[in-house]
Image (spheres, rainbow, N blue to C red):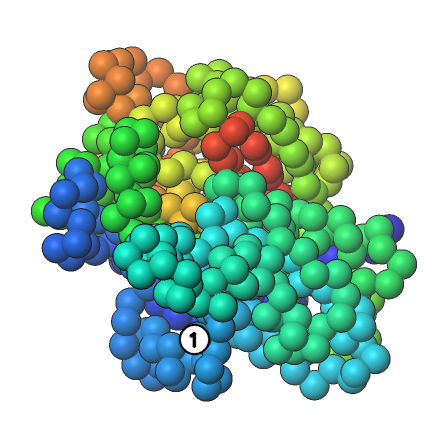
Amino acid sequence: MRRVVVTGIGAVTPLGVGAKQSWTRLINGQSGIVSLGDRFNAIPSRVAGLVPQGAKSDGKWNAEERLDKGDARKMALFAQYAYTAAQEAVLDAGLQNLSDEARENVGVNIGSGIGSFEDVVKTTLAFDQGGYSKVSPLFVPRLLINLAAGHISMKFNFRGPSLAPSTACTTGSHAIGDAFNIIRYSKSTRVVLAGAAESCIEPLALAGFARARSLSTGFNDIPEEASRPFDRGRDGFVIAEGAGVVVLEDLEHALERGAPEIYAEVVGYGLASDAYHVTAPDPSGRGAFLSMKRALEDAELRPRDVDYVNAHATSTPLGDSAENRAIRNLMLGEGGYEHAQQVNVSSSKGAVGHLLGAAGGVEGIFTALAVRHNILPPTINLQCPGPALKEKDDNLDGWDLNYVPFEKQEQQVNYAVSNSFGFGGTCASICFKKYTE
């Protein structure tokens, strides 16, 4: 069974275009959440994590500078983000000069939770108003979730497996975990680009999430404070967009070709189903507990070996409470820590919002960088951890972990876990290890 390492990273997030820029702003406690424009005035939630628009030289998004001529027409925005993140990851890993033969053993596993919502909305309106002739011949190719992976495979001539999971907000973690399994068990695939992308900040999408009472509505005038993981004042998640892509590679292959950097090793992958409700988690946190437990079993680790948990924590009242309970039960249970404050857990969603299907890709990068640099990224906007005020629960027992509030913390991180959970009860956890020869 092969050892699998992270040799490249690429990201497009509300903190900027570029994994290292996003990481720097994250650990400095900055926010990428902004107010939405007039198109969203009829929606109760009018804040989002938007990829900043501007010049490439400033680490911002400009499609004309980021894409080849004609690509913006062929690619939906989520696929554009995926390709840009993949391009950064390829360059970071030094894969751009692979031989034609070597490219046969490089796969792509990049998914999306929703895909091109914008194309569905615009084409539906165009068809309703103008009929058949108003439907673009590129409508279906732009719509398909697997076309992000397809465009990346074609751009770089990677002829290994081309896959595209779509498992709601767990998509990015499933992409990384499944790629991990492909490499360690495959006879041919040595490298896989893995992650996810999302871009569906449309009034109709926000209306749907708002009607499901999932979104934050109480911070429209102070958007940077809207996403509040684990905080008592949380009232829902903040929708966001972007992409996160990692290069996973067989360690032997990485060493043979002289990979410029090894960020971390992937050593465990755990899966579970909450099996409880379409949108709400089991209050006991059973699914989250099982996915983390199975990831540690896969890695042959005890709970006390984990130095840091990058929580899924989206800032929803029920979701954060269930995950907090799951983490606490696992990390303070058999084989766990003696004291709650020894358990380090934070959520980067305070800074970037919830990237839906892309969340696990971006947060997998942040977790690998935490391991690489021995830094715990902060949970911003965390003034008082506990059950949400709207839960009408004043019991603060069980809210005593180290949530890394407001400011980063420096400490040795040998093992870290990244969590992702999604609608339908799907759960995934990935365990990263500090690379040693």
- Give the residue displayed 77% in from the left and 53% down from the top: 182
Foreground residue among 94 and 71: 71
Question: Where does residue 172 sit, x and y in percent of width and height?
Answer: 55, 50
Question: Where does residue 263 sit, x and y in percent of width and height?
Answer: 61, 63
Relative side of 136 to 258, left or right: left
Locate the C terminus and report the quarter of the image it occupies: bottom right
Question: Where does residue 313 sit, x and y in percent of width and height?
Answer: 40, 36
In the picture as drawn, the residue positioned furthest to the right comes out as: 187
Foreground residue among 384 and 57: 57
Relative side of 285 to 294, left or right: left
Q: Is 31 situated above or below 299?
A: below
Q: Residues within 10 Å of mark 1 (few under 14, many from 20)?
A: some
- Give the residue displayed 86% in from the left and 63% down from the top: 188
Q: Is residue 217 visible?
A: yes
Query: In which quadrant of the rendered view does residue 214 lie?
Result: top left
Q: Is residue 407 visible?
A: no
Foreground residue among 261 and 336: 261
Question: Where does residue 199 sit, x and y in percent of width and height?
Answer: 39, 56
- Give the residue displayed 28% in from the left and 57% down from the top: 129
Give the amino acid at mark 1. Answer: Ala
Q: Is 324 situated above or below 17?
A: above
**Residue that badge 1 annotates:** 72
Q: Secondary structure at mark 1?
A: helix
- Give the residue displayed 24% in from the left and 37% down from the top: 216
Q: How many marks?
A: 1
Relative side of 198 to 414, left or right: left
Query: In which quadrant of the rendered view does residue 272 lie?
Result: top right
